[in-house]
Amino acid sequence: MVEQLVINVGRKIRELRQQRGLSLRRLSDKVGVSPSAIQKIEQNLISPTLGTVLKITKGLGTTLQSLLDEHMEARDVVHLPQEKRRTVLVPDLRISLQSLADGLPNEAFSAILLTIPKGARMKEREFRHHGEELQLCMKGKVQFTIRDETYLLRRGDSLRFKSYLRHYWENVGGTEAQLLMICSPPIHLGRSPNEG
């Protein structure tokens, strides 16, 4: 089931904000996004960029999985058939994210399948966050730049790095590419691109 990011997060952001007793103004002050923009996102009147969603959910203290999964249950085994995986389109990056490992409380890592169209690349060249990543190229060719060094990943190649290092990727092949991305701790949508 493929859904636009705005549809997934608007209502959930409002619910989380209200559960935490935050007014639009207080959340705005915490995350640096105007109250009117937050209100429009909550009402699905505008489609936020991924960067804006990252800021808002950081202020709410939530994770990618919990933001996208409306039916999180306390369990210790999760079987997730392919057809039941939640897929989210990220319009500003033209990529799709498919969560492979959500559903456990207090998750130690996140596992996401990134599908990257031909020619697509990250918008921010200075992206960084806490923890570490393992990237496994499932198909296509993806070039990573970490600090000032480049690494070309072809099918079967992997790359592990500390996520606080500046990193940037782009699909340099002639076809769609896919990456299996494992991050520990789990990716939080609220992390700012410049956060170390």
Image (cartoon, rainbow, N blue to C red):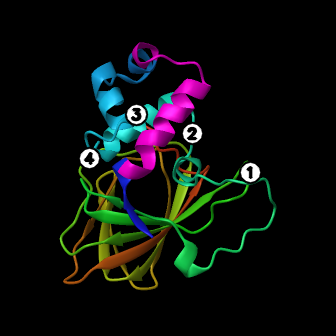
Mark 4: give few (<14), some (14-19) or many (20+) Cα within 10 Å.
Answer: some
**Quarter assignment of residue 46:** top left
Mark 2: give few (<14), some (14-19) or many (20+) Cα within 10 Å.
Answer: some
Residue 173: tell me if it is visible.
yes
Whether residues under marks 3 and 1 lie with C-beta atoms below 8 angstroms apart, the answer is no
Residue beneath disc 3: 55
Whether residues under marks 2 and 1 lie with C-beta atoms below 8 angstroms apart, the answer is no
Residue 190: tell me if it is visible.
no
* Label 1 SS: loop
Task: Determine which of the numbered discs, if any, sits on residue 62 in the image.
Answer: 2
For the N terminus, the image quarter is: bottom left
Residue beneath disc 4: 124
**Measured from the top left, where is residue 10 in percent x and y?**
41, 41
User: How far apart, in angstroms, are the residues tagged by discs 4 and 1?
Assistant: 31 Å
**Measured from the top left, where is residue 185 in percent x and y?**
62, 49
**Measured from the top left, where is residue 169 in percent x and y?**
30, 62
Q: Residue at x 57, y 69 (%)?
A: 100
Amino acid type, label 3: Lys
User: How far apart, in angstroms, are the residues tagged by discs 4 and 2?
Assistant: 22 Å
User: How far apart, in angstroms, are the residues tagged by discs 3 and 1?
Assistant: 23 Å
The residue stretch that appears in magenta? 7-26
**Which SS type dominates the magenta stretch?**
helix
**Quarter assignment of residue 19:** top right
* Label 2 SS: loop
Whether residues under marks 4 and 3 lie with C-beta atoms below 8 angstroms apart, the answer is no
* Label 3 SS: helix
Amino acid type, label 4: Glu
